[in-house]
Image (tube, rainbow, N blue to C red):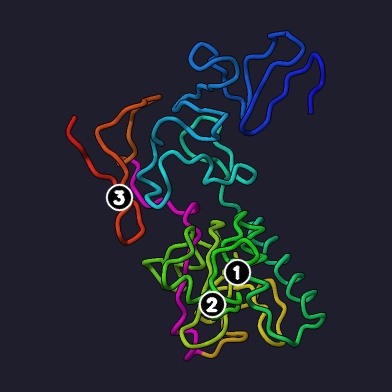
Amino acid sequence: MKTSGTQNHTLFTTSTLGGIECYRFGFNGMEMDNEWKGEGNHYTTEWRQYDPRLGRFMSLDPVMRKYPGWSPYNFSFNNPIWWNDPDGDDPNKEKDPETLKEGAEKGVEAATEFHGNTTSPACNIGVRTAVKHAAGTSSLYPSWLGGEVSGDGTANTISKSLEEGKISDFVKLEDQSFENIQKLANEGVVIVGTFTGWNHIVMAVPGQIEDGYPQVMETGRNHRESQTPLNTNVRSEHADKIIWYAYKPHLEVAKEEDVIPRKNYNTTNAVWVRGFWGGMKLVEIEK
């Protein structure tokens, strides 16, 4: 769509229409650098260079060591609708406990609507809906619905996909204690709990530990609660076997001193390579 005399800005393109050059800032507030690749084809941010034609940064992410599972050239975790990165260093979508609570409420609504009642199990529906609202990712949906879960999208297949590392934006937490799960949920981190050998899945929500158990959204059989202790619908022998996975962009996996203290650079003596295990590794090379 073009409007004469106005400037057109989209995520991947920008142009001046009507023959009037009157605005030097484009997408995400970035400053256009028309001397490098032509008019509207290059943006300069505080930390990196951006090519709107490709929708990619042209230099490495200065905080790439915080997110080793992501390409160092990605923009906003490949989800610019949900995340924002105006400086080119780190997406500034904050972890928000209130958004997590809202996601749980959306999950309960979806689970109830799907079956039309509260008696049938719908934990997979509830969790994947809640996660999509709270984190902006559809990765827990089955592949035929645009997600990364193999098979039919049941709780079992979600659990198996997480266990096998097939969900790109979730990672198994090292500290599996209920205290840590509740602490992270209170900070707004999206965390999903799966059960070994049991077709069930939950999402941790903000709240307080009760009788030693964290608060979760529960949309299993006979339950539609946006916040309830884990043991409401889970017996202790199953609770002890739960495995927790967190949404990776909500976790900082490196210390601040590991962040590369350089601005606006286009070269480095290290490259990212993909190994046979499917992950990414930073390898130093000789200049």
Q: CA distance from mark 2 to mark 1?
A: 9 Å
Q: Is residue 42 above or below residue 260?
A: above
Percent of width and height locating residue 210: 56, 78
Mark 3 vs 1: CB contact within 8 A:
no
- CA neighbours of label 3 inside 10 A, class few (<14), some (14 to 19), many (20+): some
Q: Nearer the viewer, residue 146 or 171?
A: 146
Task: Give the residues drawn in magenta, as a range.
Answer: 236-256
- Residue 232: image quadrant is bottom right
* Amino acid at pointer 3: Lys
Q: Earlier in the sequence, mark 2 or mark 3?
A: 2
Mark 2 near mark 1, Cβ–Cβ under 8 Å? Answer: yes
Q: Which residue is mark 1?
A: 142
Question: CA separation, marks 2 and 3?
Answer: 28 Å
Badge 1, how many Cα within 10 Å: few under 14, some, many 20+?
many
Residue in view at x 64 percent, y 78 percent: 123
Determine if the magenta segment contains residue 244: yes
Q: Residue at x 39, y 34 (%)?
A: 60
Residue at the image point whose x is 78% and y is 17% from the top: 6
Instruction: Give me the disc on residue 157.
Output: 2
The percent coordinates of residue 96 (x first, y second) are: 60, 52
Residue under the image location 54 percent in, 77 percent down: 157
Residue beneath disc 3: 281
Looking at the picture, which amino acid does disc 1 mark? Pro
Sequence-earlier tag: 3 or 1: 1
Q: Is residue 193 magenta?
A: no
Work out how far the residue at label 3 is from the one at label 1, CA to CA, in angstroms. Answer: 28 Å
